[in-house]
């Protein structure tokens, strides 16, 4: 039987290692678009970068509603699903600073500056999602 995670437990779960998030945004026709993202938590906000001209970037500029799922695909199959509304930040200093921090998580501190420079350029967006709803469960092994 699955058990609900506490606030601290789900934050630790989504922040563990290099788990990616599967981000869902809303297409212009109302349909869903899903893509993996690198991300960090900043308090009660989810933070990630994307290009202005990507499908998710265009979707977020038009409609800020998002859902994100982070899961562990090994038994006992825990997951966290988040819903919220995105706020776009285009300040290049903030874009690069967060791109560097995010890269540190996924590529390691020794390559963080390299990826921060690559992802902290004009045309890139910093996306801050205020989390409105969380569904988080841990599986229990038999």
Image: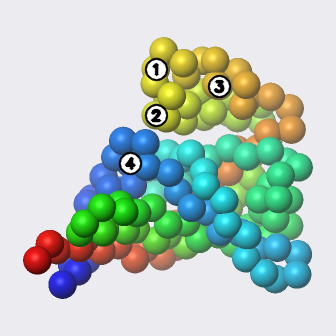
Residue density around tag 2, few if under 14, some if 14–19, many if 20 or more, within 10 Å: some
Which of pointers 1 and 4 lies earlier in the amino acid sequence?
4
Find numbered disc 1 in the image and state the secondary structure of the residue it sits on.
helix
Residue density around tag 1, few if under 14, some if 14–19, many if 20 or more, within 10 Å: some
Mark drawn on residue 109: 1
Residue hosting label 2: 105
Quadrant the C terminus occupies: bottom left
139 relative to 71, above or below: below
The residue located at (64%, 25%) in the rendering is 115
Image location (x, y in percent) of residue 66: 65, 69
Q: Are marks 2 and 1 in contact (CB under 8 Å)?
A: no
Which of pointers 4 and 2 lies earlier in the amino acid sequence?
4
| Gap in angstroms between the C-alphas marked 2 and 1 | 7 Å
Residue extending furthest left? 142
Residue hosting label 3: 116
Which of pointers 3 and 2 lies earlier in the amino acid sequence?
2
Image location (x, y in percent) of residue 68: 55, 66
Hey, which quadrant is residue 55 in on the image? bottom right
| Gap in angstroms between the C-alphas marked 3 and 2 | 11 Å
């Amino acid at each position: 039987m699955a058990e609900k995670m506490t606030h601290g437990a789900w934050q630790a779960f989504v922040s563990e290692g290099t788990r990616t998030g599967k981000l869902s945004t809303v297409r212009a026709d109302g349909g869903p678009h899903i893509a993996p993202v690198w991300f960090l938590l900043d308090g009660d906000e989810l933070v990630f970068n994307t290009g202005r001209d990507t499908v998710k970037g265009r979707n977020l500029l038009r409609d800020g509603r998002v859902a994100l799922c982070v899961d562990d695909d090994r038994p006992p199959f825990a997951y966290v699903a988040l819903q919220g509304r995105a706020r776009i930040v285009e300040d290049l200093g903030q874009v690069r600073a967060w791109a560097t921090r995010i890269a540190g998580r996924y590529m390691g501190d020794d390559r963080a500056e390299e990826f921060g420079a690559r992802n902290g350029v004009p045309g890139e967006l910093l996306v801050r999602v205020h989390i409105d709803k969380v569904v988080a469960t841990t599986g229990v092994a038999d």
